Image (cartoon, coloured by chain):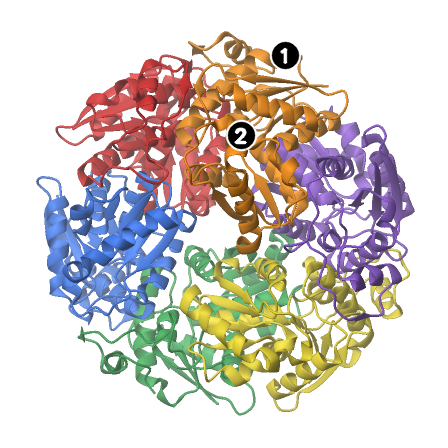
Chain colours: A orange, B red, C blue, D green, E yellow, F purple
Amino acid sequence: MRLLVLNPNISDSVSALISAEAKRAASPGVLIDVLTAPFGVAYIETRLEATIGAYAATCMAADHHASYDGVIVAAFGDPGLHGIKELLDKPVVGLTEAALTSACLLGQRFSIIAISSRIRAWYAECVAYNGLTSRLASIRGLDQPLSDVGGIQQDHGAALKQLCLQVVEQDGADVVILAGAPLAGLARSLSGTLPVPVVDGVSSAVRHCETLVSLAPGRVTAGSYALPPAKPHTGLPAGLAACLAAGRRPD
Amino acid sequence: MRLLVLNPNISDSVSALISAEAKRAASPGVLIDVLTAPFGVAYIETRLEATIGAYAATCMAADHHASYDGVIVAAFGDPGLHGIKELLDKPVVGLTEAALTSACLLGQRFSIIAISSRIRAWYAECVAYNGLTSRLASIRGLDQPLSDVGGIQQDHGAALKQLCLQVVEQDGADVVILAGAPLAGLARSLSGTLPVPVVDGVSSAVRHCETLVSLAPGRVTAGSYALPPAKPHTGLPAGLAACLAAGRRPD
Amino acid sequence: MRLLVLNPNISDSVSALISAEAKRAASPGVLIDVLTAPFGVAYIETRLEATIGAYAATCMAADHHASYDGVIVAAFGDPGLHGIKELLDKPVVGLTEAALTSACLLGQRFSIIAISSRIRAWYAECVAYNGLTSRLASIRGLDQPLSDVGGIQQDHGAALKQLCLQVVEQDGADVVILAGAPLAGLARSLSGTLPVPVVDGVSSAVRHCETLVSLAPGRVTAGSYALPPAKPHTGLPAGLAACLAAGRRPD
Amino acid sequence: MRLLVLNPNISDSVSALISAEAKRAASPGVLIDVLTAPFGVAYIETRLEATIGAYAATCMAADHHASYDGVIVAAFGDPGLHGIKELLDKPVVGLTEAALTSACLLGQRFSIIAISSRIRAWYAECVAYNGLTSRLASIRGLDQPLSDVGGIQQDHGAALKQLCLQVVEQDGADVVILAGAPLAGLARSLSGTLPVPVVDGVSSAVRHCETLVSLAPGRVTAGSYALPPAKPHTGLPAGLAACLAAGRRPD
Amino acid sequence: MRLLVLNPNISDSVSALISAEAKRAASPGVLIDVLTAPFGVAYIETRLEATIGAYAATCMAADHHASYDGVIVAAFGDPGLHGIKELLDKPVVGLTEAALTSACLLGQRFSIIAISSRIRAWYAECVAYNGLTSRLASIRGLDQPLSDVGGIQQDHGAALKQLCLQVVEQDGADVVILAGAPLAGLARSLSGTLPVPVVDGVSSAVRHCETLVSLAPGRVTAGSYALPPAKPHTGLPAGLAACLAAGRRPD
Amino acid sequence: MRLLVLNPNISDSVSALISAEAKRAASPGVLIDVLTAPFGVAYIETRLEATIGAYAATCMAADHHASYDGVIVAAFGDPGLHGIKELLDKPVVGLTEAALTSACLLGQRFSIIAISSRIRAWYAECVAYNGLTSRLASIRGLDQPLSDVGGIQQDHGAALKQLCLQVVEQDGADVVILAGAPLAGLARSLSGTLPVPVVDGVSSAVRHCETLVSLAPGRVTAGSYALPPAKPHTGLPAGLAACLAAGRRPD
């Protein structure tokens, strides 16, 4: 099985974190390739940055999906995810939905630990889009400037663990989600030290994508995830144009 | 007052409909300019197409907003809208939120008439994002192929009026929204012939944008609509790059 | 265009605040008349007082609407609003729905600043009636006795501004609503000094009512906002009796 | 124990139905007095009519409550109910909340059978105000003109029973509510002939009011149901003025 | 009238509290019998313990209901309640639903005071099952070890009263529910000393059960509360087996 | 890895279906053992039957979990699931939550196909408990008597496929869930013949349980899924007593 992991941002240091955790999480025999966005920003905190990342992820997916069994959009917030699900006739999983899924299987209410205060509004909207607001205990975030997005775990490790403890003790969380690709792998090191389960988006996405591939639930030719009806277009990158012009599933 | 109206799609025929209705709706002395997306698809029916239109609208907004008092994103579904609100320090209004706003001021429950069946899933998600699902009576759509998106009003006028009557009689709608830029202007001609008020997104957006400009509610430097914090970026169009690199509101 | 503004309470000092802000907000050529309730209480804090104000506003609307293009119910909480919408075949707008509308066009989540603690429960129910609870960040209110309802802005200006800052910093508000006719005009003076947009119900209602008049969305003869079916009645004020006895829209 | 039952409408024939069912339902030793509104309409179908009925019920409650242990607002939709709860330091129960309460104790989902189609929108809003929309299976109503509100049970008995069967078979109702004072007593005659429990507002309200009196849960001096703070007023009926001017609970 | 009260737990000291309060609350002529579970735990704090209590209560109901007019499940959280409603063709009321019902008739928003911190998660789920989360102001609980479940009122009386005051002052509660059979009777002694009404589950359940018996709303032969269709079974206690094998209502 | 699959019902024929599909779905090297409940009913359609199944599943889990890495509760509706999650310090997954999880990863809205009409009410409550009602398009069920629960796929295959097509065409389902252990394996045979993905609870549960085991998210010692505090108990089966008496995680 081959999985394509798309980092919708331009930070190679984050792609390295993603790649390391994805490979640790993957089942034996699953090959993982990680691509970094060719355009965009260092990391996504807002709706505006998500617009950019969504388009970058979509273009990457159109260009590179061909030889893979499944695709992962590796930014919390899932930029472009549901459009890419329409585009490709194979499992596509986002970090947010994957982490929420793992959390929901582990307990009734979860909290999200985020890398900045600003990002919380966007995350709350992502949880709402997934229909899971009633199970969200809280979102807490670091409130310090981030000098190096690839080094957050080193620079703010103690503060992140403190936030984890706060959501259990004060907010009623049964499960903690460490949100955002820059925190990839942190759950693995924290999991023995917290009083509740701790969930990571990257490892969750890899495993859930493997599951969907293996369940083989069938192709989509109707409903809102079928490829959009063919219609005129212009000025699109070649990969995306090829998919859309076909007016049907690429294969 | 000058308002910039962005068509996130590539159809000049739809831009013409938008322009005509926007100018009919505008207050005396309000200048309207309409731009058509330089890349994208003919019209947006799905999440995937919305991803493309969102990026196109964002790039247009970054490039062209400078001399305008307000900006309108003129596709139902509001692709890119909330990101553009973060980007610009001036009122930005979308067709969906504008139509929902007008409808909510006219009655408790509204229905949406759409140009295709496929588009309904995406519209339902847009209503949910606006938090107004509890006031949505129904979404009904044409179920016929659209040969010419600029000619829907001519080709399917009777069917559209029939859908309007059905939502009043069968779904409990107090107000009807004619959704989508290709229907711009239709509400104006139907309004005398239906038993409930009928709302158009373009005229609503123009008027509501004028209102926000005149209310002058103040600049945004905090909360989730402030310009995102400055961070590294690469490969972005010049206009967008200029806005983001500044790490503060463009002016 | 002529707009009738109804103060459902008996405080002439509040009517003066309403009138001043309404006239500042109105477009050129829009005439504003403000009426004070002939019976009732000084201001509305509770459901009981809203019952009284609702009936007063309804009676005033029935008596005086004839020469106006639109009507505004100028108390936060919108007492009697939706009944008056049934009664009159012209746009009728309330302060709460107008302020919520402006706020929703300016950001995803809003907070409400209120003139007393007691009033918060009623306001929360008003937001719920508008279906917007999911976008409400918080309601905060003054907790001091109000010696003079017409002088709250002078007496409690610093405390009100402090509440505005708290909802941005602590509650996640993207927009602040200054609620209640006694605060009419305060948003205008605060708007430059806060980090997020600030919304006033009176100016919002005037502008939104103008918009509805100009959009001319059509008369109502079906749905839940049509005039109630004719039925026996007794003991009603002459204006109201005349409207109801007709069993159809007055004109 | 003495209970005051207020008919917020002017129909003596409906008061007679209310009185008969209330007395059948009351426990031994409970005295029931029914008052008909001195002003208003024949029956309430809409928000406008509810505004009138709310004020009438409030005035009646202020004037006549003194010698009673509890008060019932005997129109479905509960016009004025929560304001009267603020006004009086004794149990006050409405037909809607009472019927919903009985229904919720009998099953998870209920349907409402109403006397007209128009009334359904208002009833849906009443259910929402009670927070019980998620348990509402459906609202169905007669769609025929009502020549005599006091004679609906005779004139439309078969149609009403048919509606009851439809909500069980088609809408998933576990319980049926026969809504509106004009249907008072019908549940009693239908209860043996339907496959699910059937609930009547009047008998439910009488019994629930008795329960609250007997539970003696304590006086209200804080929270949103305390008597409103004293404030200037004018032009109010003597009873209401006396209550309000006191700035505390009447007794 | 004879009511059977089932304590789903094994604590005779709690059954004594239940019995005393149930008898104080019952109308003249209503006989109350209380049974203690033959197996289970001392009191229920969690979903696991509720599973055990649910089965115990179901078995007790099947064995002992025959000569009673109504049945009460006397543990907050209502373990097994809705299954027992399917099983018996007579009113069955739970402590939680009864307390919520009383609270909703007394005010718009209620808080719950609980005997432990752990129990709050389960109570929140019970409120959600009743569809009343939007009316829940808060749940607060004791945070001390409970040495004697029958003696909580004596051991922690001051702390419980303090929690009651906090939910009024800080959480916006209009009504307070004292939750859990171990607090049976406490509301009666506190009701004069709190600024809002205080509700007890046992007395509420007794009175509401009496009401349902007297309303005689009819038998259930359809919908989701009819006795389950007959199907093979094995290993069940004799009482339960007898009910189920019949494939229809026992009588 | 060893997984224990618990059939909360007594039907060996259904256990055989569960076992076959679980083994087909399991990753290489994962051992599956299936246990049939020693007491209970043939299959679960209602809340009452779920109470019985919940206790049976809990007792089985307590007795037999020791040598397994994860446990699956193999009845749709997840009887006893969340209590067992409290009981065991290892992943425990239910068929409903697993199927919902798979469906949510495959599309925004799902429908459930059920084996009987009666079962739909209970399933709707299960979806609500999972917080996913907003993503539920519909529940449709067979409306024919079931002569042999192990033979439903043979006896009603065409009707089940027809229901699948209806939810796509009429209800807006993006994904179809075939609900209930008696349908285990049917998704696998239908998946190529439907226009949307089709999900099976058993295979989903096996794969998601494997995922949780491999993610190793950490032990639970706080929050609402920790083992309940130790308290007196009596009359419980030995396995369950041993777990509870410990007052901490078994093993």
What is the x, y in percent for residue D193?
A: 66, 68
**Parent chain of label 2:** A
Tell me which chain the residue with mark 1 is part of.
A
Three-letter amino acid code at the position of disc 2:
Pro
* Image disc number at residue A182: 2
- Residue at 81% in and 34% down: F185
Residue A66 disc label: 1
* Residue D221 x, y percent position in the rendering: 37, 78
* Along the line of sight, the residue nearer the viewer: F160 or E150: E150
Mark 2 or mark 1: whose residue is earlier in sequence:
1
Badge 2 crowding class, 10 Å Cα cut-off, few under 14, some 14 to 19, many 20 or more, is: many
Residue F91 falls in image quadrant:
top right
Side of F115 relative to E127 (left or right): right
Residue type beneath disc 1: Ala
Q: Kindly identify the residue that appears in the image at 74 percent across and 26 percent down.
A: A27
Q: Residues within 10 Å of mark 1 (few under 14, many from 20)?
A: few
